[in-house]
Amino acid sequence: MFVLLAAAVTGTATLLVPVLAGEPSRSPAAGGEIKNPTESPSFPLVTESTSATPSGETPSPEPTASEFEFSESPSPSPAIETTTPPEQYLGEIDEVAGDIYAAKLAVNGTTYPHAVYDSVSKCTSDGSAEYDLGRQWDRLTAMVGVSDDSSDGVVVQFEVIADGRNIATRKLKLGQEARLDLSVKGVLRLKLKTSYLQGGDTTRCTRTLAKGVWGDAKLITT
């Protein structure tokens, strides 16, 4: 509490003197005692409300742990299994090396709608293509031979190479064909190779053209 004391002489400064409650205050100007006031001024005690609930409303009880709803964690989706189809034509698989072409071609009078082939001649003596089997296949089947639109008298050699090892060789001329049914179980890299051996017009490359055909060549799982 502060008491305002005014000086007796005009123009002197006004002093604010702190006065402790319950103790008499002295006037520095008069030097006399000032009796305690008969009644100390009272101030209302203000307390901070601990609840934001408006007056007159009953506060809602706090929810207990048992009142909360818990949803179960979703079960993990089952893993998608990738399976190798029972069979697949080589013409539907991209080669990883070399060049080979897919087409419908005839060999010895039979048309193969899912054939793959390479063109060879005296100037382009051989062609090949490699496939990544991923050790997922068991057998390779095909009807091999020289296409019916090839030059007369040409002889073509067909080779199947599995992981660097030759597992089949056939030499065929126009009008001949041979069936292949080979095990490729556990093979990682498969290579098909066709080579020109002889025949046709050897004086000009453009007049000697042979297509080494792998008729409906496909991979099979058993």
Image (cartoon, grey):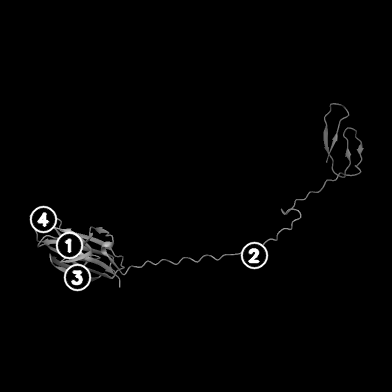
Earlier-in-chain disc, 3 versus 4: 3
Spatial CA span between label 3 and label 1:
14 Å
Image position, residue 162 (x, y; %): 24, 66
Q: Nearer the viewer, residue 74 or 115?
A: 115
Q: Amino acid at mark 1?
A: Gly
Q: Which residue is mark 1?
A: 212
Residue tagged 2: 67
Q: Residues within 10 Å of mark 2 (few under 14, many from 20)?
A: few
Please state the horizontal and vertical placement of residue 51, each as a whole percent of the image: 72, 54
Identify which residue is drawn at 26% across, 64% down. 90
Q: CA distance from mark 1 to mark 4?
A: 16 Å
Question: Which amino acid does the dot numbered 3 rest on?
Answer: Arg
Mark 3 and 4 residues: CB-CB less than 8 Å, in contact? no
Asked if 87 appears above or below 98 in the picture, the reply is below
Task: Tell me which label, 1 or 2, sits earlier in the chain.
Answer: 2
Q: What label sits on residue 149 in the rendered view?
A: none
Q: Which is nearer the N-term, disc 2 or disc 3?
A: 2
SS of the residue at dot 4?
helix
Give the CA separation, mark 2 to mark 3. 76 Å
Q: Which mark is residue 207?
A: 4
Alpha carbon distance from label 4 to label 2:
91 Å
Task: Identify which residue, 133 or 15, lies in the foreground.
Answer: 133
Q: Quadrant of residue 109?
A: bottom left
Specify the amino acid type for callout 2.
Glu
